[in-house]
């Protein structure tokens, strides 16, 4: 039986911004209609993608009235690539909307008393602000409507981004506006050399081919560059000429790796990386600190906004030099080392062992002597036994992944009862959930959103909590 065709909605008025970068309006029956790539004030016909009892998911078809909040997107790939869904919105309004989303999330999901939330701290750079990008190869790239209509034979090899919702659908990128030079030039040179020399591109669906992925890291504060080429086979006759070409064409590359990854996914944390040229790390600086960033290291992808984020975190911590600080989910110790000069001692915990080794190195090269770092699953490390062996924390800084904190970790924080908690989050929804659990002992005193990712709906949020 054929599926019933969903009926389009005509003349929908877009009312406000909603979660996950969508906007919303209401149909004639009063149901919420979520629409991607829309702006409050638009009037449009929309194509219904998904229909549920309480809401409808839709996409724009024809815009009859354009919102005053709109601007012309910079990127030719806007609408296909999922990276910059808000590029059509003027940046000052992006910041306002992100602040609004944080406020509504805290009120509706947190269900706790909150102070006034100031405007999110905007990024000075709204283009070329990222220090890390990953691009995927494909031998069966996604074709645009224009290419399909041309009826010409198309070269299906490409190097670019996955289309949202399609693990095997990759669009070729001509220019990306997110990472500074020479990122675009390096990616183009790789693609050109590979095609000229008939190096096989990977097919993720059938798990075949050679060139799989390339990661480019550009240290915004030092200018150092790292390139990591990921391949699927051991065929050095394809790999070595390409990395040699990059070394010759781009002498500014200070760290050049390649890695053979035969797994079903592109993660390389469990793979051996081969340093082909240069130093095994690049460096970023922040105030008088230098951070080493290895090929497997995490570092905030907007270096300049990371400084804003950490400055707010340190300010909210209210350190005088006498406090013991626990830094949960410390990663490579960026926050731990950043606040260490204003603390008596900082104890960092992180589940990735390699990250903890980086954290120790970052303390060592910066002559920070009052940090201790431990590796392991947070809920298994932060226990009664751990607390008995270490001084009780006066302040806890926690910066968990998008999933938020495990309930065991929240319960341990309530048991430790530090006088202050600073909660840094890249997901206000899970942050609000955890704040609700902490509400039995803590009061939220300050909130400051920080925009790390212009042209996306993502927002970092810093919350200060005081023991009641």
Image (cartoon, helix red, strand yellow):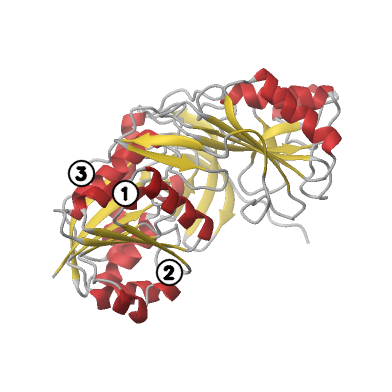
Q: Estimate the x, y position of residue 367 in percent, counting from the top left.
A: 33, 46
Above or below, 332 relative to 277: below
Above or below, 404 relative to 130: below
Is 199 displayed left or right of 467 in the figure? Answer: right
Q: Which mark is residue 118?
A: 3
Q: Residue at x 26, y 78 (%)?
A: 415
Q: Find the distance from the CA under tag 3 to the CA under tag 2.
A: 31 Å
Sequence-first disc among 3 and 2: 3
Labels 2 and 1 touching (C-beta < 8 A): no
Image quadrant in which you'd find residue 276? top right
Which quarter of the rendered picture does the N terminus lie within? bottom right
Q: Which mark is residue 378?
A: 2
Q: Which residue is mark 1?
A: 368
Q: Estimate the x, y position of residue 74 in percent, counting from the top left.
A: 50, 23
- Any part of residue 28 in sight: no
Labels 3 and 2 touching (C-beta < 8 A): no
How many other residues sit within 10 Å of disc 1, few (<14), some (14-19) or many (≥20)? some
Q: Find the distance from the CA under tag 2 to the CA under tag 1.
A: 24 Å
Q: Secondary structure at mark 1?
A: loop
Give the number of the mark in front: 2 or 1. 1
Above or below, 220 relative to 346: above
Q: Residue at x 28, y 65 (%)?
A: 435
Q: Estimate the x, y position of residue 175 in percent, counting from the top left.
A: 59, 24
Image quadrant in which you'd find residue 111? bottom left
């Amino acid at each position: 039986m054929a599926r019933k065709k969903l009926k389009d909605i005509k003349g929908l008025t877009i009312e406000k911004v909603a979660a996950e970068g969508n906007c919303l309006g209401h149909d004639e029956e009063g149901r919420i209609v979520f629409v991607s790539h829309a702006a409050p004030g638009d009037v449009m016909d929309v194509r219904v993608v998904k229909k549920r009892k309480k809401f409808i998911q839709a996409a724009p078809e024809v815009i009859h009235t354009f919102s005053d909040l709109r601007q012309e997107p910079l990127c030719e790939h806007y609408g296909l690539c999922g990276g910059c869904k808000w590029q059509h919105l003027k940046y000052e309004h992006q910041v306002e909307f992100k602040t609004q989303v944080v406020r509504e999330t805290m009120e509706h999901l947190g269900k706790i008393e909150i102070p006034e939330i100031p405007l999110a701290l905007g990024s000075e750079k709204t283009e070329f602000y990222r220090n890390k990008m990953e691009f995927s190869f494909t031998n069966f790239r996604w074709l645009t409507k224009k290419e399909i209509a041309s009826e010409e034979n198309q070269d299906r090899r490409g190097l670019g981004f996955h289309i949202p919702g399609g693990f095997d659908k990759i669009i070729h990128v001509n220019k990306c506006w997110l990472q500074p030079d020479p990122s675009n030039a390096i990616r183009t040179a790789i693609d050109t050399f590979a095609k000229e020399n008939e190096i096989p591109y990977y097919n993720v669906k059938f798990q075949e081919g050679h060139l799989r992925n390339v990661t480019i890291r550009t240290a915004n504060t030092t200018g150092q560059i790292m390139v990591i080429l990921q391949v699927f086979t051991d065929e050095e006759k394809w790999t070595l000429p390409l990395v040699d070409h990059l070394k010759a064409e781009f002498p500014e590359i200070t760290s050049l790796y390649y890695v053979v990854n035969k797994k079903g996914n592109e993660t390389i944390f469990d793979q051996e990386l081969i340093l082909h040229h240069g130093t095994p790390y690049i460096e970023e600086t922040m105030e008088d600190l230098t951070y080493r960033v290895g090929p497997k290291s995490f570092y905030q992808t907007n270096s300049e906004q990371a400084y804003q984020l950490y400055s707010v975190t340190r300010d909210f911590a209210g350190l005088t030099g006498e406090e013991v600080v626990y830094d949960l989910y410390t990663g490579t110790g960026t926050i731990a080392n950043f606040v260490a000069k204003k603390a008596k001692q900082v104890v960092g915990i992180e589940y990735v062992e390699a990250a903890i080794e980086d954290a120790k190195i970052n303390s060592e090269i910066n002559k920070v002597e009052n940090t201790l770092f431990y590796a392991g699953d947070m809920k298994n490390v932060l226990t009664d036994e751990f607390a008995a062996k270490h001084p009780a924390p006066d302040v806890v800084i926690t910066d968990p992944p998008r999933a938020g904190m495990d309930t065991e970790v929240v319960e341990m924080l309530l048991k430790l009862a530090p006088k202050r908690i600073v909660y840094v989050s890249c997901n206000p929804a899970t942050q609000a959930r955890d704040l609700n659990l902490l509400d039995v002992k803590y009061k939220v005193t300050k909130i400051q959103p920080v925009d790390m990712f212009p042209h996306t709906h993502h927002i970092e949020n810093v919350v200060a909590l005081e023991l009641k």
